[in-house]
Amino acid sequence: MRNPLAEKVTAIPPSGIRKFFDLVSEMKDAISLGVGEPDFDTPWHIREEGIYSLERGRTFYTSNAGLKELKEEIARYMQRKLSLTYDSNTEIIVTVGGSEAIDMALRAMLNPGEEVLIPQPSYVSYEPCTILAGGTPVILELKEEHDFRLTARQVEEAVTDRTKILVLPFPNNPTGAILEREDLEAIAKVVIEKDIFVISDEIYSELSYKGEHVSIACIPGMQERTIVINGFSKAYAMTGWRLGYACGPAGIIKQMLKIHQYAIMCAPTNSQYAAVEALRNGDEDVARMREAYDQRRRYLMHVFKEIGLSCFEPFGAFYVFPSIREFGMTSEDFASRFLAEEKVAVVPGTAFGACGEGFLRISYAYSLEDLKRAIERLARFVEKLRAEQGKGQA
């Protein structure tokens, strides 16, 4: 029998995030700091709107591109948050999470062999989605000494005549790094000069702890060459509602819609009605959750200093990315031993690209109580490793 599977699919490794999540789910008294999922419930007024939509019998398909009402609210949100104007009829599409938007954008824009610049460490989907779309991933390594920021020079040096797209994953998962306006202005200059496009994944845009988030689409000349991707999972604690969106030039959105029509049909209807409520009346909820995350962020930075664990200060998302290089272990070995010996799950930095070696991703989208219990175990584990090192050097 011939091989029924596509080689480009079998060659893609499974997600490194899910491995540790699956292990900890079977372990008694274990604490998971591995999954980027808010510990908050979806705010009640948003849940209530979803329930109400079901009670009203709104179980039909919506328009492929999404509810008109929701697209209009997204357009208003982009205007009031970023001063960006989008036509809700032609420049916005509602998707099944931000992940579907990433996949569709790459498939709609890439011809076989065209290159996509992907800064890493970063979200696990960009590289495999590029491959599945027939593109060629080109990895740009983000450095701790630069606060894991992408520089215009890195982009300029990586561009070839095959380069089509730059992925901008900021605020960043897993590092928590952000780009500020001056960073974006310098990158935009290269993007325009080299005539390439940007997919800007801004799913963590509401979770920024150093001033207001800035999108590269706000830089003059960039809105017409940028797909902005966002969603409701992180800001509104709506992960299971599976709802995102993309805003961009009408010509690109039109082709993304074609893929969406054939592959998905439309995003979940009751989720869309709930999202309308989130955008209209959810700002206070977002502010409350952001304040709680910031408190946890500052707590972790304080205790890392106390236990002597090196970690640059992140200003976005809800992750820290401490270095464990001092222990001479791979990220995978450290995470595996930590889970086995202390029953705490974290994600090896290599799950987000080879240049994540020597780091761990720790999510603080968990209660302060769980974080404190986990950090007690981390301090004990680090002390044990340092004692082992001391014996080895004696």
Image: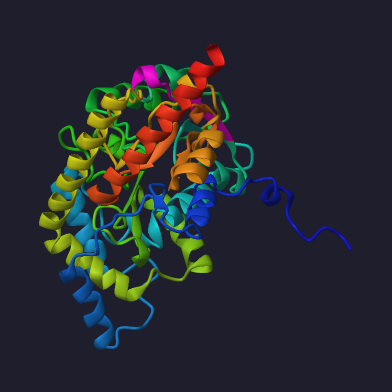
Residue 93 in view of the camera? no
Quadrant of the rendered structure where residue 145 is?
A: top left
Residue at the image position 26 percent from the left and 31 percent from the top: 303
Nearer-the-camera pick, 338 or 214: 338
The residue that appears at 63% across and 42% down in the rendered structure is 112
**Which one is nearer the viewer's eye here, 374 or 216?**
374
Q: Is residue 77 above or below residue 378?
A: below
Task: Specify the segment rendered in magenta.
Answer: 137-147
Figure quadrant of residue 319: top left
Residue 293 visible: yes
Q: Is residue 160 located in the magenta-colored stretch of the structure? A: no
Q: How many marks are shown on the rendered structure?
A: 0
The location of residue 330, given as percent across then percent down, is 55, 29
At x 41%, y 62%, the residue is 96
Question: Which residue is pictured at 23% across the width and 48% down the height?
Answer: 368
Residue 193: image x %, image y %?
A: 40, 23
Q: Is residue 10 above or below residue 297?
A: below
